[in-house]
């Protein structure tokens, strides 16, 4: 699917039967799961973060999430989550998401938009940390609108 304006990073998603509610729609909580998957993929790809090697020393926690649900997603839909960093602070950064769905040969449609505030965290020391300089540099290089 074509990226929405201002978004470069995409994560294809599989809509699983187990993700649906009793009415056959993607359960509202699963949108957060899909965005979590996109977030981990974004930080892995853009910041070269390998969570298997460094989660205890360098991680992130979710401080805030907001979602605007626009259209239902159902089993069989093609889904892609686009992610971008829209703000870099001292210890936190904002990620924005656009979840697109496509049914059959139809045009992609925005199913949801969201924003999360992420806080850099050292789990071994149980405390917040500054956004790592390597992440900051990588995100600025990847997201030209951050400047």
Image: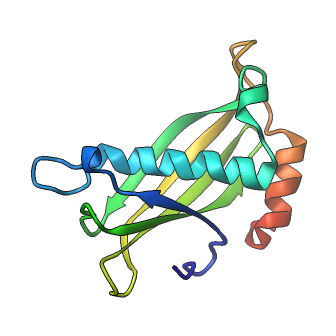
Q: Position of residue 58 (x, y in %)?
A: 77, 28
**119 and 71: which is toward the camera:** 71
Residue 55 seen: yes
Q: Is residue 100 left or right of residue 75?
A: right
With 118 as the anchor, is 47 left or right in this view?
right
Q: Residue placed at 74% from the left, 72% from the top?
A: 145
The answer to whether 74 is drawn above or below residue 26 in the figure is: below
Q: Nearer the viewer, residue 31 or 119?
A: 31
Name the spot of residue 1 as percent of width and height, x first.
51, 79
Residue 142, placed above or below residue 53: below
Which color mode does the image show?
rainbow
Q: Residue visible at 53% across and 47% down?
A: 37
Please report the residue visible at 29 percent of the width from the left and 66 percent of the height from the top: 76
Q: Is residue 58 visible?
A: no
Q: Is residue 73 left or right of residue 12?
A: left
Residue 126: x and y, percent? 69, 14
- Viewer-side residue, 82 vs 18: 18
């Amino acid at each position: 699917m074509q990226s929405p304006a201002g978004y470069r990073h995409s994560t294809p998603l599989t809509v699983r039967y187990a993700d649906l509610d009793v009415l056959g729609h993607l359960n509202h909580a699963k949108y957060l799961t899909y965005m979590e998957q996109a977030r981990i993929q974004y930080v892995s790809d853009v910041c070269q973060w390998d969570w298997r090697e460094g989660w205890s020393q360098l991680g992130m926690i979710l401080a805030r999430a907001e979602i605007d649900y626009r259209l239902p997603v159902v089993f069989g839909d093609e889904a892609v989550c686009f992610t971008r960093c829209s703000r870099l602070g001292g210890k936190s950064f904002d990620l924005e998401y656009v979840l697109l769905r496509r049914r059959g040969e139809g045009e992609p449609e925005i199913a949801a938009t969201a924003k999360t505030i992420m806080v850099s965290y050292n789990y071994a020391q149980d405390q917040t940390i500054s956004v790592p300089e390597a992440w900051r540099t990588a995100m600025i290089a990847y997201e030209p609108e951050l400047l």
